């Protein structure tokens, strides 16, 4: 089972990396870019567990290891 | 227009960050985790351009700024 987990800063948290990318794009003339937020993506391959278990495991792993729940939010989807 | 761009190492490229996360999860007892690949996600807000232009702009920005095409691949989708 393949899972994609997206981790990004909460909207209320400043994102200096995204800001830097936005500034770089503006300097290069890409004026249509109004905002950039940068985050992390994890693609995880799970084996030997049922879908129900995976649906409990993924949020647990995300909260404990992949994201810092104080400043980050996460979102996930099964890929197949 | 909101766009999500996923940037990750090509499958042939080693991913030490993903490996480290996998090892951490195994140490914590999550044996179902067979593989972890880590990448970056960018959410970009575009304004004042048509969808057709955006569809040309996004791969251009991805190749020039967001990803290193030698070792990374990217994938994108319009969010709305």
Image (tube, coloured by chain):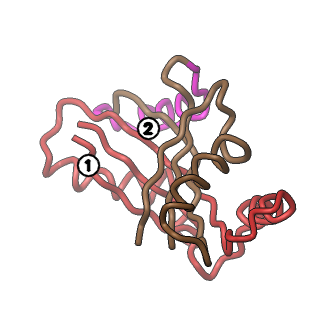
Chain colours: A brown, B red
Element at label 1: strand
Determine the residue positioned at 71% across, 75% down: B14
* Extreme residue toward the bottom, this view: B12
Compared across the picture, whether B43 is left or right of A49 comes to left
Residue at 23 percent across and 36 percent down: it is B1
Please report, as a chain letter, where disc 2 is located: A
Q: Residue at x 50, y 59 (%)?
A: A4
- Taking depth in this image into account, of A14 and A58 the one nearest to the observer is A58
Q: Is residue B61 magenta?
A: no
Position of residue A30 measured from the top left corner of the image (x, y, whole percent): 34, 38
Label 1: chain?
Answer: B
How far across and how far down the image is residue B29, in percent?
81, 62
Q: In the rendered view, tell whether residue A14 sits above or below residue A20.
A: above
Query: Circle 2 — which element?
Result: helix
Q: Looking at the picture, how far across and down is residue A75, in whole percent?
A: 48, 44
Q: Is residue B41 left or right of residue B51?
A: right
Instruction: Using the image as rendered, state which of residue B26 and residue B40 is in the foreground.
Output: B26
**Viewer-nearest residue: B9 or A19:** B9
Q: Which mark is residue A25?
A: 2
Q: Is residue B45 above or below residue B64?
A: above
- Mark 2–mark 1 CB contact (< 8 Å): no
Magenta span: A13-32
Which mark, by number, is residue A3? none
Q: Quadrant of residue A72?
A: top right
Residue drawn 44% across and 34% down? Answer: A36
Looking at the rendered structure, whether the residues under marks 2 and 1 are on a common chain is answered as: no
Q: CA distance from mark 2 to mark 1?
A: 19 Å
């Amino acid at each position: 089972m393949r899972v994609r987990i997206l981790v990004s800063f909460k909207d209320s948290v400043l994102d200096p990396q995204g800001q830097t990318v936005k500034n770089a794009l503006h300097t290069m003339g890409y004026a249509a870019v109004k905002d950039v937020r940068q985050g992390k993506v994890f693609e995880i391959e799970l084996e030997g567990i049922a879908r129900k278990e995976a649906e409990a495991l993924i949020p647990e792993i995300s909260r404990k290891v992949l994201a810092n729940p104080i400043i980050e939010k996460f979102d996930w989807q099964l890929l197949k």
